[in-house]
Image (cartoon, grey):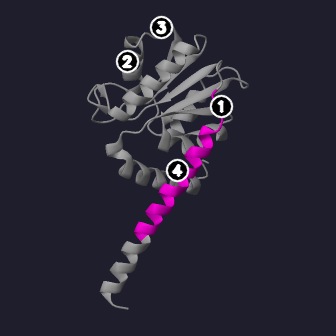
Amino acid sequence: MSFFKIITYTIIIGILSYVFCIVFIGINSFLQYQHKVPKNADYIIVLGAGLKKDKPTRALRYRIETAAKYAKENKSAKIIVSGGKGNDELISEAECMRVELIKLGIEEDRIVKEDLSTNTYENMKFSKKLIHNDQAQVVVVSNDYHLFRSLKLAKKQGLNVVGLPAKTPKVIIPTAYFRECLSILKAIYYKQM
């Protein structure tokens, strides 16, 4: 087989794999939305999504706004903001989310920080330690493309969860879905899901 054919087949397989992953995540995300978000959840876990120094990225901004809206409708829920500090970040994602939620009118005493995690698996593992009731109803807030894996990882930790999707910035959709496909494969490989 010629070098040109090998390259051509590799590109075709790559494109088909990418399309399959997008369809898979899309269908699973749609199915996740079929679960009604309870009006009286005990906890809200807001997952980090990167910072620009000490400010939220647009994806994280959408997560924060979605969580704040739900928290205002559910005054009894504790909010766990989950995300550590990246090398290029001035503060932890959890601290940024705490500050932004307070700006949006959420009472500081409702917010619990989990600022050690560096990935979604750790978000769930470390957030679980902050939930003192195994039967607690938990709402996980993340961007729509990210909810499938997030909920699978949360359930693996024994959490009783439902997802609340935040919209995904259009500009990041192609790369976000591609990265999420790889992350799902990695989580399956390491038996995290």
Q: Residue 187, percent across and down?
A: 55, 51
Element marked by disc 2: helix
Residue ID at (32%, 32%): 57
* Residue 150 in the figure: left or right of residue 62: right
Highlighted magenta segment, given as a residue range = 14-37
Q: Identify residue for label 1.
A: 36
- Do we see residue 113 in this rendering? no
Q: Label 3 sits on what residue type?
A: Glu
Q: Label 4 sits on what residue type?
A: Gly
Q: Identify residue for label 3.
A: 107
Element marked by disc 1: loop
Element marked by disc 3: loop
Q: Label 1 sits on what residue type?
A: Lys
Q: Identify residue for label 4.
A: 26
Q: Which mark is residue 100?
A: 2
Question: Do the numbered discs 1 and 2 sit on residues whose CB atoms are within 8 Å?
Answer: no
Q: Residue 139, percent across and down?
A: 59, 27
* Quarter of the image with the N terminus in it: bottom left
* Residue 54 in the figure: left or right of residue 123: left
